Structure formats: C-alpha cells, structure tokens
C-alpha cells in the first residue's frame, strides 16, 4: 500500500486532508521541522516566565478559580487535575472518525507554536494519530466554550496512558495498548493540560468531515434533480443560461450549469418553441392536455439548491480558517515576548457556520421529499400510477411505505433545524456566561446529513421505478442511465410486495459513497 504523509505547519491544513486521514489508514501526519523549532522556543519562553509572573492556567486555578495562585511544586499536579477533572463525559462514544479528526486539528493548532506545548507532547499526539490509537470519547459534555473541554480531556487522558482507546477495532484500556506498542505514557509539563483541551478542535474536526458529506449531498441532489426533470419531460428553459444570468447568485448559476451539463445527452426535455406550435391561443377559454410549467420542486432546482451550495462554500471557508487557527488561552507571542489572554476558544464561528449549513441541508431534504410526493401522488402528476405501483393499485402497495419513511425523516430534519448555537446556558459559576454549543451543533448537523441521505436514497428508488414504468431508458441522459443501472443492481423494481429491508440498506450505502460531481463551487 502506497503511503502518503501530510505535513502539518499549523497554517495550511485543508478540510479534504482531514477527511482523507479519517478514511485512509495509509495516510500519516508529520510535523514540519520549522514548526517544531518554533514550538520549542515558545515552550522555553513560557518556562522562563511562569516562575516570575502570574499566568492563567499555568500557576493559577481555572475559570472562576483563577484568583487561586498555585505553588511552584504543584503546577504539574494542576495540569493532571485539569484532565482528570474534565474527562467526565457521558453517553455513547463518538465515531472514531470524529475523534481522529479532532486529534489532527489539535496537533495542527499546537504546531503553530503559540500554545506553550513541548515538541515531545506534539510527537506523542502524532504517534497516536499515525498508529490510529483512538481515544474513547463520550458524546455528552461540551458547551463549546472554553472550547471542547470535556471531549478533548478524554483525548488528553489517553495521551497520559489513562482511559480507554479503540485500537484495531477493539476497545482496550489505554495503558494495555501503549505497553504492547512500547509507547510511554506522556508526563504533562506546565500548561500542557490546558493546551490540549482549551480550544475548538473537536467541533472543527467534526465540522470538516460534515462539509465533505454535505458536498456529496449537494452533488447527489443535483443528479437526482436532473433525473427528475427528464422523467417528467420538463421544459428546458428553467435551466437556461440566460435565465440564471439575470439573477447572478453564484450557487444558482453553478447548479443550473451542472444540470445543463448532466442533461446534454438527454432526449426527454421539452422545448418551449415546439410546445408553442402545438397549441394556439383562441377567442374562447379552454384547457390544454399538457402542463405549461412544472411545480416548484422541479422548476426551481437551481434556486433552491443554489443557496445550499453558497452556504456550504462559506461554511467550508470558515472551517478551514478555524482548523488553522490558535484557539486556546493564554497564547504566547514569542516575537513580542508576551502572553496574551483572551477568548479564541469560543466556538461561535464553528457553531454558527455549521447551524447555517444544517438548515440549508434540511431544505435539500424537503426539496427531495416534495419530488417524491410528486411522483407518488397520481392526483398531482396525472400520469404515473399511484405510489409507483407497477401491478395492481389497491391490491399491492408499490412504494407507499417508502413515502412514509421520506415524510417522517424530513419532518425529523425540520425539528433538528433549529439553530443550536442560540441555546446558550451560563455555566462554570457564570464564568462561561455565554457559550457556543458548537460540538452539539455539529452532532445535530450530522443527524440531518444522515437523514438527508435517507430521503435522497428514496428519491432514487422512486425515479428508478418511474423509469421502469416509462420504459424510455435509451432517451435518458448518460448520467441518469448510470443512476438507473446502479439502482437496479442494488434494488430490483417492486412489482409484487416483498421484504426489501436489506436492499434498502445497500441503496443507502451507495448514496453515501456516491461520486461527487466536479463543480466549481468554492
């Protein structure tokens, strides 16, 4: 297996790098030599200062106990107590990909050399990442200010040989794994406990992964949108270049262009000029047997998906700034020989960005659910059989049950859409009197993403069933024909009612691994 190394400098880590590391065990990380040199100098400066100055979190207590000055002989115990006192999360373990992403972000942040961590601590974290020793981190605990204290404390706990880790698929005591690999537990130095847990690395790491998943959802939504337009024989002017140049939002234009590209090889779209020749305006009011324009979920795809794309682009940019930022406190300005106390650990940038992305993805699921309803509801489409029933409506169910799933899943998304970052509850004896809830915001967004995959999978199944009813596969675009073939490999058409639970899971896995369209969206 070909190995790849991503060099961390603290300044140029990308969202795609984090995603790749969590997906490919062959990818390792390495700290740039120049970064290690700066880290060492920063640590040496800190060690000179804390013997003669009061420095928060080094020789003081934390939060509302910052006025307690810690004796020189107790500053190491202080850091250990900080980890033990915060590694109190509860609930199910977070996915290993989320924890690994957080570890990469934390290492990149420390590599900037502003946190007062030693090169040895960075190397310990690097070893854990490269050997994929993943700390067990419970779900509940973060308020997102001073960053992700509880979750990051569980990562720090593993670095010092305590707690539990997942290694090669097995949950083990950390010390047992370290002994087997001949890795010594790390001994914390002044400020290093604080440097490990004070910051937004958990929420930023998870958000990085969600950005990549959201990109896949947008891509898939455009593809199912194109498939839908063909299946109903939509007019092509709704995606015309001139129309979208008249309203030049970037996302809208990109989505319209992507639809035009996908549909270049289609023979199913209607042309307005041919329609006009078929029907004449007369002196009397009368009804014609064709629609003049489609419902909004078909006609307004660029106008609905475009804002989602624009939101994703902004969120992606904000997250890439975050993962290359210094987010702990205090920070060491080595050039000016001073320490700066502040609040870069506050997670609102991540929380707000991920909430906005989550809300936009809810609209994506709603768009897909409305198209599913269009195809299922004979009273609306006036053409397709009820619930895409290919046998005997009334006797057999067709896809009726799947519509219930799409409806309930979309409704759940709508409830999850409420922005979590405004749920600030003061805590920490009111020291943390306004918080971000950033990590929980990312976990709610992850649920929305999972649900949206479900709805899009159901739309694909519906479109495949509609294609079987039409029997016009040769006239579809190459993109839609490919989607149809893949669906039929995984999920044969439903004629007689049958148990399809296992095949539904295969379709869901397919959409989660679908190829992303090459669209210029950033």
Image: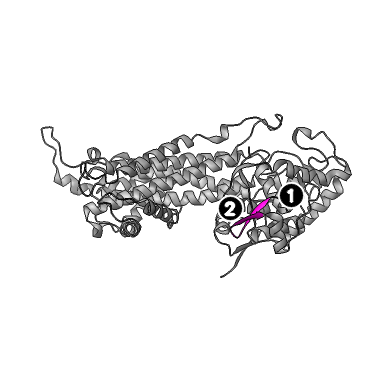
In front of the other: 323 or 101: 101
Q: Does residue 398 show up magenta in the picture?
A: no
In front of the other: 175 or 26: 175
Residue 451 occupies quadrant = top left
**Relative height, residue 236 to residue 474 (above, below):** above
C-alpha gap between disc 1 and disc 2? 28 Å
Q: Estimate the x, y position of residue 504 in percent, counting from the top left.
A: 38, 51
- Point 66% across, 54% down: residue: 108
Q: Estimate the x, y position of residue 105 in percent, counting from the top left.
A: 64, 52
> Can you say which quadrant of the picture contains the N terminus?
bottom right
Residue 11 horizontal side relative to residue 504, left or right = right
The label on residue 96 is 2
Q: Does residue 164 show up magenta in the picture?
A: yes
In front of the other: 128 or 352: 128
Q: Residues within 10 Å of mark 2 (few under 14, many from 20)?
A: some
| Residue 12 visible at all | no
Q: Report the colour scheme.
A: one colour
- Residue lying furthest left: 283
Q: Which residues are magenta?
A: 163-172
Q: How many marks?
A: 2
Q: Estimate the x, y position of residue 489 in percent, counting from the top left.
A: 34, 60
Q: Which residue is mark 1?
A: 114
Residue 477 horizontal side relative to residue 152, left or right = left
Q: Are marks 1 and 2 in contact (CB under 8 Å)?
A: no
């Amino acid at each position: 297996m070909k190995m790849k190394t991503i060099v961390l400098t603290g300044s140029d880590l990308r969202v795609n790098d984090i995603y790749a590391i969590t997906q490919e065990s062959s990818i390792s990380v390495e700290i740039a030599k120049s970064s290690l040199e700066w880290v060492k100098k920063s640590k040496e400066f800190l060690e000179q200062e804390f013997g003669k100055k009061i420095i928060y979190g080094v020789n003081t207590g934390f939060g509302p106990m910052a006025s307690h000055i810690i004796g020189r002989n107790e500053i190491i115990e202080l850091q250990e107590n900080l980890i033990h006192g915060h590694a109190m999360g509860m609930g199910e373990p977070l996915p290993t990909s989320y924890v690994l992403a957080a570890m990469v972000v934390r290492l990149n942040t420390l590599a900037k050399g502003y946190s007062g961590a030693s090169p040895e601590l960075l190397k310990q974290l690097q070893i854990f990442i490269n050997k994929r020793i993943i700390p067990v981190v419970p779900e509940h605990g973060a308020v997102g200010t001073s960053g992700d204290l509880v979750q990051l404390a569980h990562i720090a706990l593993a670095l010092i040989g305590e707690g539990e880790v997942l290694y090669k698929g097995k949950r083990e005591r950390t010390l047992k794994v370290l002994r087997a690999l001949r890795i010594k537990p790390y001994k914390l130095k002044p400020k290093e406990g604080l440097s490990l847990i004070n910051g937004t690395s958990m929420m930023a790491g998870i958000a990085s992964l969600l950005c990549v998943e959201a990109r896949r959802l947008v891509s898939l939504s455009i593809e199912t949108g194109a498939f839908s337009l063909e299946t109903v024989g939509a007019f092509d002017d709704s995606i015309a270049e001139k129309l979208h140049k008249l309203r030049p939002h970037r996302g809208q234009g990109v989505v319209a262009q992507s639809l035009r590209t996908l549909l270049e090889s289609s023979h199913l779209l209607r042309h307005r000029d041919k329609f006009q020749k078929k029907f004449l305006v007369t002196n009397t009011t009368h009804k014609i047997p064709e629609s003049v324009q489609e419902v909004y979920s078909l006609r307004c795809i660029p106008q609905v998906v475009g804002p989602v794309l624009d939101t994703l682009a902004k969120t992606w940019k904000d997250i890439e700034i975050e993962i290359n930022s210094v987010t702990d406190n205090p920070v060491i300005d080595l050039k000016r020989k001073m320490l700066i106390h502040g609040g870069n650990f506050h997670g609102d940038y991540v929380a707000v960005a991920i909430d906005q992305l989550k809300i936009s993805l809810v609209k994506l699921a709603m768009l897909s659910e409305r198209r599913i309803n269009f195809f299922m509801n004979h009273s609306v489409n006036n053409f397709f059989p009820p619930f895409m029933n290919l046998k005997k409506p009334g006797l057999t169910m067709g896809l009726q049950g799947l519509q219930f799933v799409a409806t309930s899943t979309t409704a759940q998304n709508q409830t999850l859409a409420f922005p979590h970052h405004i749920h600030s509850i003061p805590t920490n004896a009111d020291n943390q009197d306004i918080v971000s809830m950033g990590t929980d915001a990312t976990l709610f967004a992850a649920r929305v993403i999972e649900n949206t995959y479900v709805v899009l999978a159901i739309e694909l199944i519906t479109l495949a069933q509609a294609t079987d009813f039409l029997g016009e596969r040769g006239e579809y675009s190459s993109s839609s024909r490919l989607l149809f073939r893949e669906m039929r490999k995984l999920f044969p058409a439903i004629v007689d009612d049958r148990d399809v639970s296992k095949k539904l899971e295969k379709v869901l896995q397919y959409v989660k691994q679908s190829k992303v369209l090459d669209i210029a969206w950033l």
